Image (cartoon, rainbow, N blue to C red):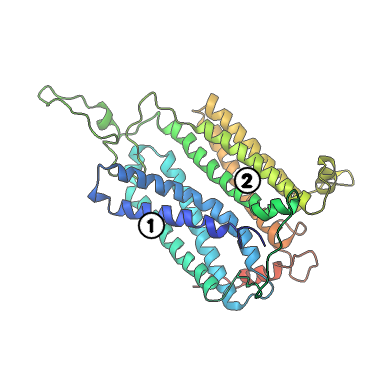
């Protein structure tokens, strides 16, 4: 038992659900306040809520491993399966839509306003339906619910011990996954800003009448307008950026690199907390090499991909500072970053549910001794397919 039970997933899910859905509701009725700052706030809510789905999803990996105990029923497995699929699809759609909204020029946002809005409402619908399945399995079937015996009291951790730290912060695996999700969210936000630095320099045809029309001699004197005079149509669209506007892509990349370093530190905490020696030399020889040769196990590859994510964020920070207009280089590094994030999530799922041994591209067969105690239950959830 911990200070927060059963895990932080039950807390983190409220941010994307609440902020994202409220922002969509305000945007839906935006015709009532076209020039109001409320709409600007709603667009930030949509953006932040969409990116907040990533740490909520990665914390859900740990929550799912906690919920899929060997005694799980078929109905519980079905509801968890549907919840996982719906929320995973919503997270992917919301994340890439958020990157588009940050990266696209104002003209492109205007052109695809209704398409983007439809995708965002589809994400909101998937989130609501997925949340319904999660609530049903918890409150009607008692999934992941622990009932203490009458009169039983939780033992208090002793101050100054490792148990005290874990009691108040949670398991190292959970902290590692939450930090990974926040790192991914910041990386995608920084990627959108890096692309925006390019698109902001080249306004398209939709911008030209807005920024190049000269007032006629008979036109009345202009009066100061709202802060966002051309923003009623596009989602999250600022007005035409002034020349002195700074797009802080490099700062976001550096913060992402710092979080990637903290995520690696949390991963090292997992390794040391499992009874291994805390020395870096022991870590290297026990996990990364075997008989003098580098190994390619799930655990070792997870470490290498994590280091590559740290390196890529630092390279992209340098690129955004000294070569912001290099589209080809940005496309190459951005593609590598997305592939590394996808690989890291997959390897993390394998490690959490199936242990450090086994194939890299699938779960181990249930009869193998290397599978963890939860692998059979999770495999049962996966074999059921997707059905509502």
Left or right of 249 in this view: 276: right
Residue extending farthest to the front is: 151
Residue 147 sits in quarter: bottom right
| Residue at the image point whose x is 50% and y is 63% from the top | 86
Label 2, label 1: how many angstroms apart (C-alpha)? 29 Å
Percent position of residue 310, x then y: 65, 38
Q: Which mark is residue 121?
A: 1
Residue 292 location in percent, x, y? 88, 43
Q: Is residue 78 above or below residue 221?
A: below
Residue located 68% across and 54% down the image: 173
Q: Residue at x 33, y 55 (%)?
A: 25
Taking the view exactly as shown, the residue that stands out farthest to the right is: 291
Q: Nearer the viewer, residue 305 or 203?
A: 305
Q: Are marks 2 and 1 in contact (CB under 8 Å)?
A: no
Q: Residues within 10 Å of mark 1 (few under 14, many from 20)?
A: some
Q: Residue furthest bottom?
A: 74
- Quadrant of the frame with the N terminus: bottom right
Q: Give me the disc on residue 83.
A: none
Residue 170 visible (yes or no):
no
Query: For this view, does 138 lie left or right of residue 305?
Result: left
Secondary structure of the residue carrying tag 2 is helix
Local crowd at mark 2 within 10 Å, few (<14), some, or many (≥20)? some
Side of 338 relative to 151 (left or right): left
The spot of residue 103 in percent (x, y) is 44, 39
Pointer 2: what residue?
340
- Residue 231 on image: x %, y %: 29, 40
> In the image shown, does 177 or 203 lie closer to the viewer?
177
* Nearest to the observer: residue 81 or residue 108: 81
The residue mark sitting in front, 2 or 1, is 1
- Horizontally, residue 382 falls left or right of residue 294, namely left
Instruction: Report the number of numbered marks.
Output: 2
Farthest residue to the left: give it.
Answer: 218
């Amino acid at each position: 038992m911990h200070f927060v039970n059963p895990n932080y997933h039950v807390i983190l899910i409220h941010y994307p659900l609440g902020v994202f859905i409220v922002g969509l509701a305000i945007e839906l009725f935006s015709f009532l306040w076209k020039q109001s700052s409320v709409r600007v706030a709603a667009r930030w809510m949509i953006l932040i809520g969409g990116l907040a789905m990533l740490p909520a999803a990665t914390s859900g990996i740990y929550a799912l491993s906690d919920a899929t105990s060997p005694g799980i029923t078929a109905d519980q497995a079905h509801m968890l399966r549907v919840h996982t699929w719906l929320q995973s699809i919503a997270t992917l759609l919301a994340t890439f839509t958020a990157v588009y909204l940050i990266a696209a020029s104002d003209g492109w946002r205007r052109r695809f306003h209704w398409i983007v809005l439809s995708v965002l409402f589809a994400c909101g619908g998937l989130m609501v339906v997925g949340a319904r399945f999660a609530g049903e399995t918890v409150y009607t079937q008692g999934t992941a619910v622990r009932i203490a015996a009458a009169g039983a009291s939780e033992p208090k951790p002793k101050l100054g011990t490792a148990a005290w730290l874990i009691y108040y912060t949670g398991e190292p695996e959970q902290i590692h996954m939450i930090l990974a999700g926040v790192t991914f969210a910041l990386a995608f936000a920084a990627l959108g800003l890096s692309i925006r630095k390019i698109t902001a320099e080249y306004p398209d045809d939709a911008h030209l009448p807005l920024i190049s029309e000269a007032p006629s001699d008979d036109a009345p004197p202009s009066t100061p307008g709202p802060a966002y005079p051309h923003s009623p149509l596009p989602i999250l669209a600022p007005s035409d950026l002034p020349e002195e506007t700074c797009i802080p892509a490099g700062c976001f990349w550096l913060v992402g690199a710092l979080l990637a370093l903290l995520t690696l530190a949390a991963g090292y905490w997992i390794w040391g907390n499992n009874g291994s020696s805390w020395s870096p030399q022991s870590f290297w020889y026990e996990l990364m090499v075997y008989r003098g040769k580098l190994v390619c196990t799930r655990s070792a590859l997870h470490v290498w991909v994590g280091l590559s994510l740290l390196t890529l964020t630092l390279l992209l920070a340098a690129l955004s500072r000294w070569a912001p207009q290099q589209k080809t280089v940005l496309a190459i590094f951005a593609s590598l970053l997305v592939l590394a994030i996808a690989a890291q999530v997959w390897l993390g799922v394998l490690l959490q549910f199936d242990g450090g041994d086994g194939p890299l591209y699938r779960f181990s067969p249930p009869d193998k001794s290397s599978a963890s105690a939860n692998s059979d239950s999770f495999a049962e959830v996966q074999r059921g397919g997707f059905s509502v």
